[in-house]
Image (tube, helix red, strand yellow):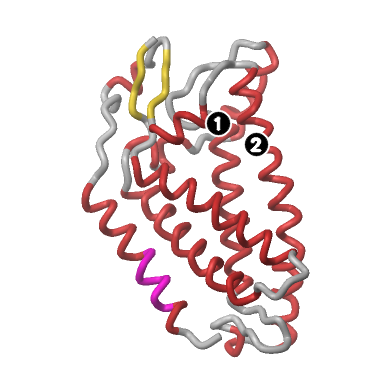
Amino acid sequence: MKSTLVWDWPVRISHWLIVLLFTGLIVTGKSDNDYIQYHFYMGYGLSAVIVARVLYGFYGSYYARFTQFIRGPKAALRFAKSLWSGKPKQYLGHNPIGAAMVVVLLLALSVQWGTGLFSSDEVFWFGPFYGLVSEDVASQLASIHHLLPNILLGLVALHVLAVLYHELCLKERLVASMIHGHKKHHSVSSADVASIEVKTPRWGVIFSLFMGLSWLAVLWMAPI
């Protein structure tokens, strides 16, 4: 079996930061204790990481790019049928169903932190953009912000179950690969041969990191 670097360090770091920040946001958001200040700051951090990750999806390494792993519904259906048969096609990067989950999670998380910027605890803490909309609009956005976490938890549960299926049934070590970046494979399709050596583009990292930190600075300096 060959081992190939698939997930370079920006992908791995952003992935685990999203996991940690989302977990912290769920704990602080659903806790009976007053953690609203930490909730706001972790939300800012999550938004910055997602901004950087989305940009890296355009300017990053080969397997990090959306153009590499986003496929249509037909490809997802074919992959689902191959899963059912017990002989799924091997992908070095995201498979079509996994790619769809990545996009859905990034979109849902973006809606979550986006609506949080217009929300408040109706007592002391206000999102930095709360004053830019009417009270009715702010109330509607707050409703979405309070409803969406339950949907996100369901999506995360599906994601974890899919990972467990790959780990236990297909013997594909996805968790380990998201730690050290390498994936083992029997063979590589001709489409992947030219890009088998993943290189981290310096300017892609700098641009994504700069924009993510700039966004974080804007939110951090805004009044809450």
Q: Report, in whole angstroms, how far the alpha carbon at label 2 lies from the one at label 1.
A: 16 Å
206 displayed left or right of 108: left
Q: Which of the marked residues, 2 or 1, is nearer the chain's N terminus?
A: 1
Based on the picture, tell me whether residue 216 belongs to the magenta stretch.
yes
Residue 134: % across, % down: 68, 89
Q: Which mark is residue 160?
A: 2
How dense is the environment of label 1, judged by Cα within 10 Å: few (below 14), some, or many (20 and up)?
many
Residue 51: % across, % down: 44, 60
Residue 216: % across, % down: 42, 71
Between 193 and 122, which is closer to the camera in this rendering?
A: 122
Q: Residue furthest left?
A: 202
Task: Name the magenta segment's main secondary structure.
Answer: helix
Q: Residue at x 33, y 28 (%)?
A: 5
Q: Residue at x 42, y 15 (%)?
A: 185
Q: Residue at x 61, y 30 (%)?
A: 163
Between 167 and 201, which is closer to the camera in this rendering?
A: 167
Between 69 and 106, which is closer to the camera in this rendering?
A: 106
Q: Which mark is residue 96?
A: 1
Q: From the viewer's perspective, is residue 194 above or below residue 62?
A: above
Q: From the viewer's perspective, is residue 7 above or below residue 202?
A: above
What is the magenta range?
A: 212-218
Amino acid type at mark 2: Val
Amino acid type at mark 1: Pro
User: Helix or strand or loop: what does disc 1 sit on?
Assistant: helix
User: Helix or strand or loop: what does disc 2 sit on?
Assistant: helix
149 displayed left or right of 102: right
Residue 133: % across, % down: 63, 86
